[in-house]
Structure formats: C-alpha cells, structure tokens
Image (cartoon, coloured by chain):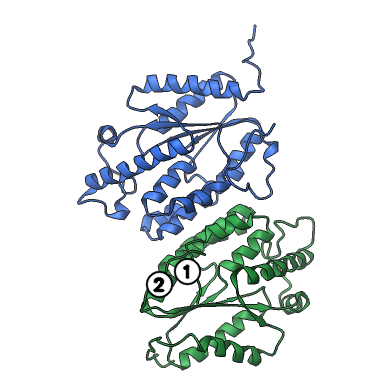
Amino acid sequence: MRRFESYGDGIPRVNLDELSGWLVVVEGTDGVGRTTHVTRLRTHLERMGYAVAETGLSRSDLASRGIRRAKEGNILGTNAYNLFYATDLADRLERQILPALRAGFVMLTDRYIYSLIARAIVRGAEPDWIKQVYSFAIRPDAVFYLRIGVHDLVPRVLANGGAFDYWESGMDMSLGADIYESFINYQTQVIQQLDGLAREYEFETIDATGSVDEIAADLAQRVTRVLGAGSSVDSPMVIE
Amino acid sequence: MNGPTIHPPAGRLFVVEGVDGSGKSTQMTLLAQWLRGEGYPVVFSEWNSSTIVKSTTSRGKRRRILTPLTFSLIHATDFADRMDREIIPLLKAGAIVLADRYVYTAYARDVVRGVPPRWVRSLYRFAVQPTQAFYFRVSLGTALRRILSSRPKLKYYEAGLDVNPHTDSEESYRMFQGRLLEEYDAIVQEFGLTVMDASQPVEVQQRILRRAIGAHLNGIRKVAHAPV
C-alpha cells in the first residue's frame, strides 16, 4: 500500500514508498495559537509512545538566513519571496520531514504549503501558478486548521503587548492608513484564502475561539484517530 | 511561457544559450560592443547573479546540500529577483537587455537532474518572452576540448557529481554535458530558439548574429554614451 503521495509529479530521486510515519499539519493565520497547540500535541503524542519531530516555516538549514536577511531590508520582489519560501519548504521537506517519516516518526508541522499559498495569493500571485510550484509537496495525513475571524484575532495581539508585526500586517503592501487598518485588511484576505484552501485540500477545521484546553483536547482526540487509522503500530505497551 | 506583456516604450530582450564552451559569452560581448558603438542602450543580465539570493545558492553549493529540487528552486528564486527588479524595469525604460542564459538553462539542467519537465516550466511562468533567443550549438567533443583544456578543476555541481556519484569529476562532466546537449535539442524545437552553428569562426557567427538582431531595432531610442 502506498502511504504517501505528492500533489504533483513527485520529488526528484525520492522513492515515496520508503516512507512510514505520519505527517500532521497545524495550519492557521498569524497569532491564532498554532505554536502552543503544536507543543501540546507533541506532549500528548510522546505520552502515547510516539516519536515526534517538529518543523515550521523558515526553519531550513539552506534558506532561513537568506530569507531573514532579505526581509530585514524588504528588498526582494514578490515572485522571488514566493520562490524563496518554496526553497525553504523543499529543503525542510527533503532534509527534515522525509528522514523523520522514513524513521517512522510523527512529523508535526507548524504550517505547511497552505499558508504560503494563501500569502502568495494575497500578494498577487496567480493561484494556479503558486499551487503548481508547491505541487512537489507530499499530501499530509491530516491538516488541522485553527480557524479564527479577524475581529477575534485583534484581542490576542493586544494581549501579547499590542505589537502588530510588520509582515503579519501586510505593511509591505500599504493596505491601510496605519498598521491596525493594514492588519485588518491583510488578515481578512489571508483568512479568506485559507478558508478556500480548507475546502479544496480538505482540512479539518477547528474553531479557534474556544479555550486553549478545549482546543487541545479536541486536537488530541483527532490526532489519535488519524494515527489509529493509518497505524501499523500496536497500542501503547503497558509495563507491569 | 506566459509572462507579462511589456508595453511601449519598450526595449528588447535577447538571449544567448548553450553549454559551457559553446562560445556564447564571447558572442554576446562582441554584440554589446557593436550595439553600444551604434548608440543603443545595452544592459547585461547574467544567470545566477542576484546579490541577495546568491549567498544562499553559494551556501548550498559549498556545503553540498542542494538536491535537484532545491537546486531548481533557488535558481528560480534568483531569476525571479532579476526579472522583477532588473529586466522588466529596464525593458519598460527602453533598454536592450542581453541575457547570458535564460529559462532554457534551467529547463535543460534541472531536467537532466531528474526534475519533472512540466513542473520546471511552470516555475518560470512569470518570465518575459525574449525578442529572440539564440542557441549556440556545439558538438560534445568541441565543448569538452574548450573547457577541459583550460580549466581542469571542475566544480561539484557543474560536473553533475550530485547526480552521478561514484564517477570521477571529468567523467561525470562528460556525461552531464552530453545529456544537456540532448535536452537543449528538444528545447530548441519546443520554444523555437534560433540555432547558431558554434563551430564556425567567431567573426562569421557574429556577422549572422548582428544581422538577426539588427532586424529588431526599429524604434529603439539611442542614447549618448559617456566616453569610455
């Protein structure tokens, strides 16, 4: 049985039949609480006896420095940013995600191609083009989409000290008279794109306005089901 | 390709393509001298030269961590930066842009490395269609003689050692260049590149090139070059 497949023509010189493990993605817009939930999921899975690895945007060995440097000066064009992020994701796919899957780990991914596609479209990329660019990616076992509306997102930024981030407010696109207006306009568009991708790529959507504990419990239950469904691993061993 | 259309006043984009040792860069230099002498505004754009992206490409090459996939993507990133911040504005301004290698280099190299042809073509969809692209066709023997006689130290990716492990660098280079020539022949058909016989004397090729390019220069506004 073939566990993993790519969205497109595959990854050059990689045999996807060698992969076991699980690829689990947590998606959602900036500030929705993804990182908290990835950490809680990891603890949950490790308690159940699974080996867990984590990755997230711009954490590649190859491209993270280059992306950071380019962003400091806001100097690249949009197509170049889009392809730079795709390079980062490809490097992590081949050198973090695939090795973890070969070793049978649960790979928890704090955002995947979907946020990158959403952001690219908001910045003017043709949807067909950017989806084709990312078609080398492998289809995850599950995508948990932490969904929030922009007006529930604002209090979270304020609770964290009220510092609206330049990029998370889309300030590179001059979308409003000030950073707050720009944040609202930009995040509204990003969320709209993610909602569209949620239907297209069959995310499991989770209402992220609830309490952290409720959401964590919901996620734990869902991930257990995903692992059970594709599992060749026995139930956790009981030590007497 | 399905790139943006440049509206007038618009420049021209000419491309020279071919494997190492095909003589394309020599031809381009001679062409630029002639065009400048005639008073045309000429600008070069070289493959793999975006200052911002280059440090990442170099890091990947130095540490040998580039795979066929990331090799392809980082070169597309470099190209995108040059396209949007150099080539398009210059064309809008009315310059003659001379590109030493263009998207066809990626189509040839990346496919030889195992990247799906359809995917790499889609990566470069934002590229502007050149006014005319010239492919300098040379035999494998001639190309190898020109390169291997002058430069014995072959670099890892240049020699295709990433996809031909267990061979020595010269043997790998020969195999890689041979495969590139095959890919280029297919690309010439697909994209209608103008084939130049690169085994002819330099001045003969240059005469043909000037005649071809001269036919596209109507309406280009000349400039007063600063004395060199």
Among the 4 quarters of the image, the one containing residue B188: bottom right
Element assignment for label 2: loop
Kindly identify which residue carries mark 2: B6
Q: Position of residue A234 (x, y in %)?
A: 66, 17
Among the 4 quarters of the image, the one containing residue B187: bottom right
Chain A: drawing colour: blue
Residue reaching furthest top? A240
Q: Position of residue B141 (x, y in %)?
A: 78, 76
Quarter holding the N terminus of chain A?
A: top right
- Determine the chain carrying the residue at label 1: B
Q: Position of residue B134 (x, y in %)?
A: 60, 78
**Drawn side of residue A172 relative to residue B46, left or right:** left
Among the 4 quarters of the image, the one containing residue B63: bottom right
Residue A229: image tag: none
Chain B: drawing colour: green
Kindly identify which residue carries mark 1: B128
Q: Position of residue A29 (x, y in %)?
A: 37, 38
Residue type at mark 1: give it: Val
Question: Are the numbered discs 1 and 2 placed on the same chain, yes or no?
Answer: yes
Instruction: In the rendered view, tell whether residue A49 sits above or below residue A114.
Output: above
Element assignment for label 1: loop
Q: Are marks 1 and 2 in contact (CB under 8 Å)?
A: yes
Residue type at mark 2: give it: Ile
Instruction: In the rendered view, tell whether residue B99 sits above or below residue B227.
Output: above
Mark 1 vs 2, N-terminal side: 2
Per the model, the C-alpha gap separating discs 1 and 2 is 8 Å
Question: In the image, what residue occupies the spot 36% across and 77% down?
Answer: B8
Residue B66 can be seen in this image: no
Question: In the image, what residue occupies the spot 64% across and 55% down?
Answer: B115
In the depicted view, which residue is nearer to us: B167 or A153? Answer: A153
